[in-house]
Amino acid sequence: MPVLSAITLYPIKSCAGLSLQEATVTTLGLMTEQIYDREWMVVDNDGLCLTQREHPRMALIKPTLNGATLEVQAPGMLRLAIPLDLPDPHTAPTLTTQVWDDTVLAYDCDALTAEWFTKAIGVPCRLARFHANAERPVSAKWTNGVQASTMFSDGYPILVAGAASLDDLNQKLVAAGRQPLPMNRFRPNLVIDGIAAFEEDYADSYRIGEVLLKPVKPCPRCPMPSIDQDTGAFGPDPMDIMQSYRAKPEVDGALCFGMNAILIAGQDQRVRVGQEIEVSLAF
């Protein structure tokens, strides 16, 4: 029986994740202790999102939960405590952010936080938090008209990957004289063990207890899988190996790993590592 083998929530877009034993599933993505996946995002002075694609040192910014704060740390820097209490939506400073083609209202975190992230990443930047009154719909082109929203993810609230898919890629890397890669190179929220390699590509749904997820779009991969999440440096690069068999015509030939998914049923239900998953195939 397929099982849920890993849960990871990324509080700050493009920074390190929180490995969890259980999490709450919402229409906006995973949530734990009132922290949502990709609820925060680092932006430049024009509000444009910063990612590891251009700033691989972001991988070294590691969050931890500590009571009523989200603490972040980076090499050579003191820890920074970010309050978890939501700001007053009527009086808190705001800024307009841009995530790819979407313009999103966000809370503007304070100057001390901006200074910390500027030093950690090495470019002028600020930390933005998804605003309580903001909404960011996903592309209905891929959801067959089903309405869904996300926060600061690239496009969809939940990313699912199969453990055997990584095993398959690693076998090809080793055969080519390369080192195998950990799953964190691909930054999924949920990892499924016990299914065939890339079987997640052909699933119609994943049922985890009361939670029903619908995979809607293959996840095109940018250069981020080439970034070592432990060092913040590029290499080794799996993209040339993926080019040989992971180009998907339905997304204009992009190299894909994992499936973007939306929540169909089970809002605010908990899922846990080791829980059985019913995978229904689309044929």
Image (tube, rainbow, N blue to C red):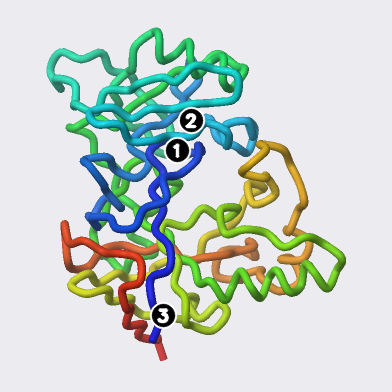
Query: Along the polypeptide, which appears first: circle 3 or circle 2?
Result: 2
Q: CA distance from mark 1 to mark 2?
A: 9 Å
**In contact (CB < 8 Å): disc 1 and disc 2:** yes
* Mark 2, residue position: 49
x then y, percent, for residue 155: 42, 50
**Residue 114 falls left or right of residue 172:** left
Element type where label 1 sits in the image? loop
Element type where label 2 sits in the image? loop
Query: Which image quarter: residue 230?
Result: top right
Query: Along the polypeptide, which appears first: circle 1 or circle 2?
Result: 1
Three-letter amino acid code at the position of disc 3: Ala
* Mark 1, residue position: 13
Which of 153/21 is in front? Answer: 21
Quarter holding the N terminus is: bottom left
Three-letter amino acid code at the position of disc 1: Lys
Q: Is residue 269 above or below residue 44?
A: below
x then y, percent, for residue 39: 33, 37
x then y, percent, for residue 240: 78, 61
Q: Residue furthest bottom?
A: 283
Which of discs 1 and 2 lies nearer the camera? The answer is 1
Three-letter amino acid code at the position of disc 2: Cys
Q: CA distance from mark 3 to mark 1?
A: 27 Å
Q: CA distance from mark 3 to mark 2?
A: 31 Å
Query: Along the polypeptide, which appears first: circle 3 or circle 1?
Result: 1
* Mark 3, residue position: 203
Q: Is residue 131 above or below residue 236?
A: above
Disc 2 crowd, CA 10 A, few/some/many (<14, 14-19, 20+) = many
**Residue 161 falls left or right of residue 180:** left
Q: Residue at x 41, y 91 (%)?
A: 283
Q: Residue at x 24, y 72 (%)?
A: 212
